[in-house]
Amino acid sequence: MSTTSLAVRPALSVRRRWTVLAVCALSMFLVGLDTTIVNVGLPTIGRGLGVGTRGLEWIVDAYTVVLASLLISSGALADRFGRRRVFQCGLALFGVASLACAIAPSMGALVAARTLQGVGASMLSPVALAIVVNAMPDPKERAQAIGVWASVFGLSMAAGPVTGGALIAAFGWRSVFWVNAPVIVAAVVLSAVFVPESRAERARRLDLPGQLLLTVAVCVTVAVLIEGPRIGWTSPLTLAGYVLAVAAAAGFVRVERHRSEPLMDLGLFRRPVFTTAALGAVAVFVALTVSLLLTTFWLQHARGWTPLEAGTATLPMALGATVCAPLSGRLVGLVGARRPLLLAGTFITAGGALCLVSPGEDVNLPLLLVAYLLIGTGFGFANAPITNTAVSGLPPARAGVAGAITSTARQIGSAVGIAVAGGLVAGVGPDGLARASRPGWLVVVACGLFLFVVARYSRAAVPAARRAG
């Protein structure tokens, strides 16, 4: 997605530029928060609506799958019709969908409203970042702004369970959706006052066939992961799902190769550096969502913790992500992406390994808190170097597309993580949750180890800015 404006505009004042960042970061906080805030409330929502674990997975994945599928197209719409306009439309749609979630009378209505939320969220994440980049022409200031952006995103993802637990304890599960309303209203007003309109100099065409095939491939893959344990991995319906997912993916590749302006620049995947970075983004978010969902069900179903207690237990994760995300950005600027990626892999691997021995007859709270701190620290260190690795060495015109693809990869990772964790614990009684969770923690360990592969392909050279200094 291009990030240049339609016409040369007068430079915004420093105060105005950072106000624009604050408004856009507020929207990003909402997108990340709603990815995880529901997790800790899933058992309570299930009791309130009378649904089991399998149905609860769709409450989370209906949001993340749609968000992942539409990110790139939403960016293209913003380039064509105006970023502020699409951003405000996304805010309004997200707000309406949040209210629909809050009053949903049934499981089906809630999943439908979460799907609509994902559509609105897809208009916020890439569009808001493009607005920030357009507002800050100075490369150094832009780098600082992106560092803040990464910190806000990491904080929102990690803070979701804590916030959700507190809201549910005080006001019930519907409050995790009501809370969006005042934030949305504030963001709409502030964007109208402070955010300038901008467009791409040359807007890309919408790739509707590619968009449809990508959506089918992602949705069917996640559906198979969620429903496979219930209907059987070799049942006719599951086998049909395999065929449809493969056919959609193959069709997507074919269509993209023959379009002059494809939805996704598949040529980027010929670069091992980019491919490993995109897969690394998937791995990081698989690890995060598996960790959150497994411990949510284990603590509440097996150990009888309240949503507030389970959410509070994730505070070390939020702390690690919040402290280490900006530190990681600075390290990338000083020494490149490899060292932060090695740190991220080490911490996530150690946290997952610790959780392998944590579940038992009694809650070993200190061990659990240390594991959460390690995973949160690894998550904080991972985001900035993965993005840097993905776009390193690319011209600006392709760097925007690379960033959009890695954002899509993150959301796909969230969707897959929820499906994997839910498949492990669905239908399992309280006494068997610890044993059923063990393969999930092995997945977290594997994701951490994969970051060492990403580090291997990342650029080890010290950035030019430092060499020049």
Image (cartoon, rainbow, N blue to C red):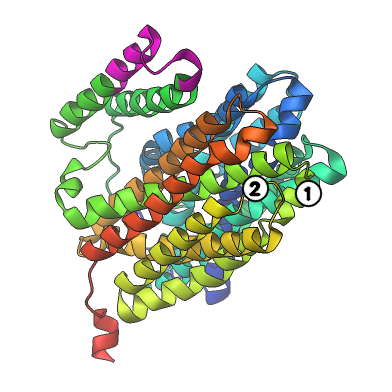
Residue 163 percent location from the top left of the image: 72, 51
Q: Give the amino acid type for the residue marked by disc 1 in the picture.
A: Leu
Nearer the observer, 28 or 417 = 417
Residue 210 percent location from the top left of the image: 28, 28
- Specify whether residue 236 is painted magenta: yes
The residue that appears at 60% across and 41% down in the rendered structure is: 434
Instruction: Tell which circle, 2 or 1, labels the residue nearer the N-terminal end.
Output: 1
Q: Which residues are magenta?
A: 229-245
Number of residue marks:
2
Q: Give the amino acid type for the residue marked by disc 2 in the picture.
A: Gly
As displayed, is residue 161 above or below residue 99?
below
Residue 465 percent location from the top left of the image: 28, 83
Is residue 299 in sight in this rendering? yes
Nearer the observer, 138 or 13 = 138
Residue 131 percent location from the top left of the image: 46, 56
What quarter of the picture does the C terminus occupy? bottom left
- Specify whether residue 405 is painted magenta: no
Instruction: Give the secondary structure at mark 1.
Output: helix
Cα–Cα gap, marks 2 and 1: 21 Å
Q: Quadrant of residue 459?
A: bottom left
As displayed, is residue 14 above or below residue 93?
below
Within 10 angstroms of label 2, few (less than 14), some, or many (20 or more) residues? some
As displayed, is residue 335 above or below residue 294?
below
Query: Label 2: which residue?
Result: 360
The single residue placed furthest to the front in the displayed view is 361
The residue that appears at 32% across and 29% down in the rendered structure is: 214
Query: Label 1: which residue?
Result: 308
User: Dominant secondary structure of the magenta stretch?
Assistant: helix
Nearer the observer, 356 or 34 = 356
Q: Quadrant of residue 443?
A: top left
Within 10 angstroms of label 1, few (less than 14), some, or many (20 or more) residues? many
- In the image, is 374 to the left or to the right of 225? right
